[in-house]
Image: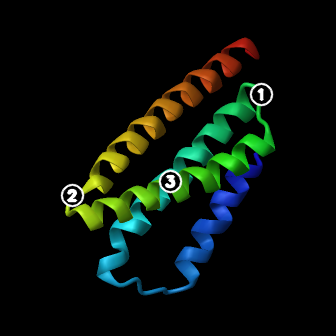
Amino acid sequence: MVAFVGLLIGIILGIVWNVDIPIKFSPYISVAIFACLDSVFGALRGSISHNFRADIFVSGFFGNSALAVAMVYLGDKLGIPIYLAAVIVFGGRIFDNFAIIRRLLIDKTKSHS
């Protein structure tokens, strides 16, 4: 639940503040956002399945973001668009976590009926 509230606060702050990001930083920001969303969906999944750990969430949130940004930087230096691979991987994990969350919620609602 904490992850969901944090996500909502982040979305509201993003809508209220109009921050212009230079085009050259857009791959970094996009990969960092995907890494953070991956952690948030993982935390939501962990919360629903009653095995959420805040230390794992925080370390994954910042660790995934830092690793993803480092990969984008390395790709920029090598002239290879590595950020696309990171977006695909994180996007796949987000959809996997969403599918598991959906199944867990459906199972919970069926067991309470």
- Mark 3: few/some/many CA within 10 Å (<14, 14-19, 20+): some
The residue sitting at 77% across, 27% down in the picture is: 51
Secondary structure under the numbered disc 3 in the rendered image: helix
Q: Residue furthest front?
A: 78
Q: Which image quarter holds the C terminus?
A: top right
Residue 27 spot, x, y in % from top left: 34, 66
User: Which amino acid does the dot numbered 2 rest on?
Assistant: Ile
- In the image, residue 32 above or below residue 52: below
User: Which amino acid does the dot numbered 3 rest on?
Assistant: Leu
Which residue is tagged 2?
A: 80
Q: Which mark is residue 51?
A: 1
User: Which amino acid does the dot numbered 1 rest on?
Assistant: Asn
The residue sitting at 43% across, 68% down in the picture is: 29
The residue sitting at 58% across, 42% down in the picture is: 41
Q: Earlier in the sequence, mark 1 or mark 3?
A: 1
Direction from residue 55 to residue 97 in the image, left or right = left
Secondary structure under the numbered disc 1 in the rendered image: loop
Direction from residue 74 to residue 104 in the image, left or right = right
Which residue is tagged 3?
A: 67
Residue 99 spot, x, y in % from top left: 49, 28
- In the image, residue 47 above or below residue 10: above
